[in-house]
Image (spheres, rainbow, N blue to C red):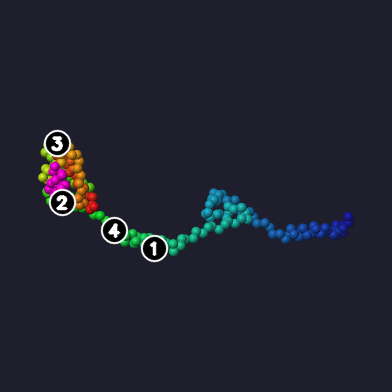
Amino acid sequence: MTQEDAMNPGPQNPADSTESARMKSMPPLPPAPPAQSGPPAQSGTGPVNPAALPFGMTPYPPTVQLPPSRRNYALFAGAGLVVGLGAGLLLAQIDLPSNSTALVDAVELCDLTDQSGIALGDEGQSLTMSGQGNETFGYGAKFADIQCVLAAIDMPDSVSSRLGNTRALDGTQTAQWGEFSTFWNYHPDDGMNVTVEVVGEK
């Protein structure tokens, strides 16, 4: 090969020329992101560190939590107000029973507040009267004291007669009048024992 041939090469392959032009037209690749030395990105719904993602990937946008509607709060508040007013009006129309003071008044009327054998219970809604007997050694209320209390609460004469004629063999007797219910028994050793309860009008 002469020097002229070396300086003027012959026609080249067209395919080689096209490939060379294509390689020259492509831009250079961007450098890879530097490696992160911090902790790996946490999984979940929190924000994702873009540097922790593989090259070329973009993170999903974070989920937006919309505030609850103020209209729902207004509806709930209005419904609660209506229910509260309705319940208040209903309770106002109901006549709630009040405790009777009849037994307390009867004990005070007969001056037996500190008398042994006279015991109020159930916030004044029951009264137990234990009389004197042969083996009570002076403890208890006298029969006249018991009769005073029963008369103060309007015990009917028929019931009072039954109570005064009760024997040990008769066992426990019961009676009811007005707002009171009572039961009693008698034994010579224990005396007369009477219990009265407020049960309301029948």
- Residue 164 part of the magenta segment: yes
Segment colored magenta: 147-165
Local secondary structure at mark 4: loop
Relative depth, front residue between 165 and 201:
165
Identify residue for label 2. Answer: 154
- The residue lying at 74 percent from left, 58 percent from top is 23
Horizontal and vertical percent position of residue 106: 15, 50
Q: Tell me if mark 3 has few (under 14), some (14-19) or many (20+) residues whose alpha carbon lies within 10 angstroms of its own.
A: few
Relative depth, front residue between 103 and 82:
103
Q: Amino acid at mark 1?
A: Gly
- The residue lying at 13 percent from left, 43 percent from top is 164
Identify residue for label 1. Answer: 78
Image depth: mark 1 or mark 4 in front: 4
Q: How far apart, in angstroms, are the residues tagged by discs 3 and 2?
A: 28 Å
Relative depth, front residue between 149 and 5:
149
Q: Amino acid at mark 4?
A: Ile
Identify residue for label 3. Answer: 189
Image depth: mark 4 or mark 3 in front: 3
Q: Quadrant of residue 25?
A: bottom right
Q: Is residue 43 above or below residue 22?
A: above
Image depth: mark 2 or mark 1 in front: 2
Image depth: mark 3 or mark 1 in front: 3
Horizontal and vertical percent position of residue 186: 16, 40
Local secondary structure at mark 2: loop
- The residue lying at 13 percent from left, 40 percent from top is 132
Q: How far apart, in angstroms, are the residues tagged by discs 1 and 4?
A: 25 Å
Q: Amino acid at mark 3?
A: Asp
Query: From this viewpoint, is residue 66 visible?
Result: yes
Q: How far apart, in angstroms, are the residues tagged by discs 3 and 1?
A: 70 Å
Image depth: mark 4 or mark 2 in front: 2
- Quadrant of image for the N terminus: bottom right
